Image (cartoon, rainbow, N blue to C red):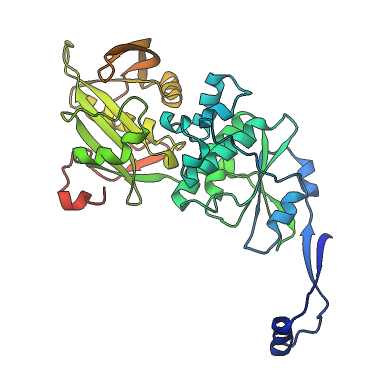
Amino acid sequence: MKYIERKNKIINDKYTEYVYEAFDIQNKEETTVKIPINFKECKTFDWNIGVIYGGSGTGKTTLLKEFGDLSQDKFDEEKPLISNFDWLEPKEATFLLSAMGLASVPTWLRPYSLLSNGEQYRASLAYKVAKAKEDDVILIDEFTSVVDRDVAKAMSNALQKYIRKHNKRIILASCHFDIMDWLLPDWTYSPLKGRVERHDYLRQSRPKIELSIFRCRYETWDIFKQYHYLTEDYNKAAHSFCVTWNDKPVAFIGVLEFPGLPTKSKRFTRTVVLPDYQGLGIGSRVTDYFAKLYKKEGYDVYTRTINPALGEYRSKSRNWVSTGKGDTKTNDKYKKVLNRPSYGFKYIGDKSTDSTDILTFNADAYKEVAQNQISMF
């Protein structure tokens, strides 16, 4: 087996002498690290995603460098995030960011320095992935090391979908094994084992996400309002719901009566998923769930959005029918008419509230929760 050997001359002083004497170290001249390298099997099959995994100090970064340069692209701090993707057409840039789990429109307009750790990591991933040429292998070190573990799962899921859809190749180095069922790698490599292990993760179903849905107070909107693309204003007459995952708030749903129609009708007035949890389909699946509940009670359900990911999902879904594109609305704050491309839909799915392929729900969406139970919001 081939090895990468790293040697370093020791500069001796009283501290190193103490170590030699205390631990009976014989070699006082140099340190040597040997890392097994054996990636031949990667050339024998087609793949999209590879992962080099192991604990700190096992040589993951050294192995990753064997495939190319690990230098990071720098963002222009004077520009909004989306303007850094200036080799793409504006519409392409919005679809790229949405596909990588950055679907919050206000986030697109902020400079890189004002993004959260999770948003910065997704932005860097999007930049590297989009810049990669057809035959390039994208290299990502310390994958998900700086983010919450639920955020890491969301990020992994969004990344693998984009990579496979566009038939790119990527190798990630990570010390975390909890992402594997979400990243679905074609192969993994552990420096301790010294060999490529092929996987057939795509034959498995991804882990389900169990969400809790609570009726919440109007003030809960404060957590989510900065991520909504239109305005931070919110109608107090709406029914408000907070969605949590592992006791953390991840999404907000607002529902209003839709008067003036011949049938009892509701419409979604707000659907906001926090940036760290975008890319898992939470917004689309939760609104599907609500639409089923309302239809079961005899309501027609309508929605309108300019979010490209949500619009594309509903365009392809058998549960929704288009009510037309294009929308003109009055912005009361500035007293002028704004024209926005948008997607309008009516729910036509069944009344069943069975679990979806990704999400399950463990709470009655209409349950009122005591104030002390939602103080976490």
User: How many callouts does the rendering have?
Assistant: 0
Against 32, residue 135 (above or below) is above
On the rendered image, what quadrant is the N terminus found in?
bottom right
Query: x, y percentage for residue 22?
Result: 69, 89
Q: Which quarter of the picture shows residue 359?
A: top left
Judge by depth and name the residue closer to the eye, 201 or 171: 171
Residue 311 in the image: x percent, y percent? 42, 21
**Front-most of residues 88 and 153:** 88
Q: Residue at x 81, y 48 (%)?
A: 40
Q: Quadrant of residue 227?
A: top left
Residue 136 rendering spot, x and y as whole percentages: 74, 35
> Is 217 drawn above or below residue 4 in the view shown?
above
Name the one closer to the observer, 93 or 46.
93
Left or right of 369? Residue 331 is: right
The answer to whether residue 109 is above or below residue 347 is below
Q: Quadrant of residue 291?
A: top left
Residue at the image point whose x is 62% and y is 39% from the top: 74
Residue sticking out furthest to the front: 78
Q: Is residue 206 visible?
A: no
Q: Is residue 96 above or below residue 323?
A: below
Residue at horizontal 54 percent and vertical 43 percent from the top: 121
- Does residue 332 appear in the picture of this structure? yes
Residue 155 position, x and y percent, is: 51, 42
Residue at position x 55%, y 53% in the image:
145
Please name whichever residue, 365 or 110, is drawn nearer the observer in this view of the structure: 110
